[in-house]
Amino acid sequence: MASSKPSVSASIPNDLESYWMPFTANRAFKKRPRMVASAKDMHYVTPDGRKLLDGSAGLWCTNAGHNRDPIVAAIQRQAAELDYAPAFQFAHPKAFELASRVAALAPGDLDHVFFCNSGSEAVDTALKIALAFHNVQGRGSRVRLIGRERGYHGVGFGGIAVGGIVNNRKQFGALFAGVDHLPSTYNRAEQAFSIGEPEWGAHLADALDGLVALHDASTIAAVIVEPLAASTGVLAAPKGYLQRLRAICDKHGILLIFDEVITGFGRMGCAFAAERYGVVPDMITFAKGITSGSVPMGGVLVRKGIYDAFMQGPEHMVELFHGYTYSAHPLACAAGLATLDVYREEGLFERARKLEPQWAQAAMALKGLPNVLDIRPVGLTVGIDLASKPDGVGKRGLQALEVAFYDHDLMLRAVGDTLALSPPLIVSDAQIGEIFDKVAKVIKAVA
Ligand SMILES: Cc1ncc(COP(=O)(O)O)c(C=O)c1O
């Protein structure tokens, strides 16, 4: 087909039209772009040379800080040594090494790792493993998947079906049959201004018993929850909630999946939030922090009993009909190994745990500023709810993000009218103060 476009191959390098940006108000962005050109440690640098303090670890992922020398060097070395190895029927040594290292960080008998390239793929992989596990065990009627309101599990069809965000679901038809949802664990009237896990709300796990009563356990394959619902505003699990969910799943033979795409790799002061809560789920999904955001990678940690259930039948047969061309990509594995070394050598998970009280105290100092409805610090992250403007939900949040970026040299996340902060785990004491000083100015500016 003849193109009506003029031949302009390289003549308009700064044209913003072609790139359809993800989860972005494209037209607003393109009128006033927020660009970054480089980064180092705790800072981004804009094309015009302004240094921004990174209050959000990119998109909750650069837990070791930006462009860390050992990670950069590992990626460079790997690119020169082995660019790609086929993921099916062949492998390269670093894939096994990284799987072993990740499994060693996980609690209990979460001993096996299936690699993919993102959190969304990790979620879809875990859901598929859950269905297939019951299938190979002769329980083919267990096909229902249970998510939770206000849950975010990425953007694959499985992930949006179990997810609980209306906007992420309503454009995409009927999604996936046989999905149901637990209620959100957040209740402002009961929990506002809680530090850490709220006292109120463990009983909300009992809604799973209600779903079992409705559907029957024999039809339910798995429950998937985030130990901390980060993307919808940093909603910590109430005290005792996850333990109760585990007990109910056990009672009914339902698999429990923790989506730790954000909480994995130190955000909650442990390798995985599962450790913080003393709960061993049947699977853990991870991504983001595994490579500190440097190369796309995701994965699913799987308990031994699940893996073993597949390792039956003729040995020449594929056991799980699932995988990605870039599963365990050499660059991602090299980046992952170097990142885990940085976490270990610098004690970054412990550091996050140690900083948590100071972080929470600094966040709580924002209480009383205009429009602040709730502040929820937990781990090394916090959600700050601002009242919506009368003329539209999300306008104050977007304005805060813009004011932070342009006027206060701060990168933060805004989800609707909630500000979310989650700095790299290398954040210094002084930088914690700097982040919240800037946030206070931003909140005042958007009053
Ligand atoms: C809990 C959770 N699951 C899944 C995802 C999706 O990850 P990705 O954007 O890498 O597909 C995210 C992303 O923020 C997430 O927070």
Image (cartoon, grey):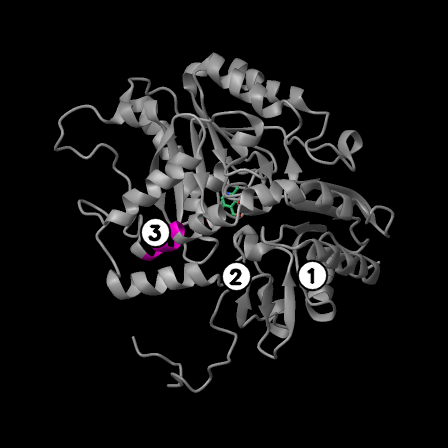
Predominant SS of the magenta segment: helix
Q: Give the residue type at disc 1.
A: Leu
Q: For the residues marked 2 and 3, what is the alpha-carbon distance in whole angstroms?
A: 18 Å
Q: Could you say which is closer to the camera, residue 224 or residue 80?
A: 80
Estimate how packed mark 2 is, as few (under 14), some (14 to 19) or many (20 or more) residues with alpha carbons within 10 Å: many
- Give the structural element (helix, strand or loop) at label 3: helix
Residue at horizontal 50%, vertical 41%?
264
Counting residues from the N terminus, which is met first, the one under dot 1 or under dot 2? 2
- Residue 333's label in the rendered image is 3
Q: For the residues marked 1 and 2, what is the alpha-carbon distance in whole angstroms?
A: 20 Å
Q: Could you say which is closer to the camera, residue 376 or residue 120?
A: 376
Q: Give the residue type at disc 2.
A: His
User: Magenta segment range?
Assistant: 331-337
Q: Could you say which is closer to the camera, residue 156 or residue 419?
A: 419
The residue carrying mark 1 is: 401
Where, by quadrant of the figure, is residue 308 drawn? Answer: top left
Is the CB of the residue bearing disc 1 within 8 angstroms of ligand 1? no
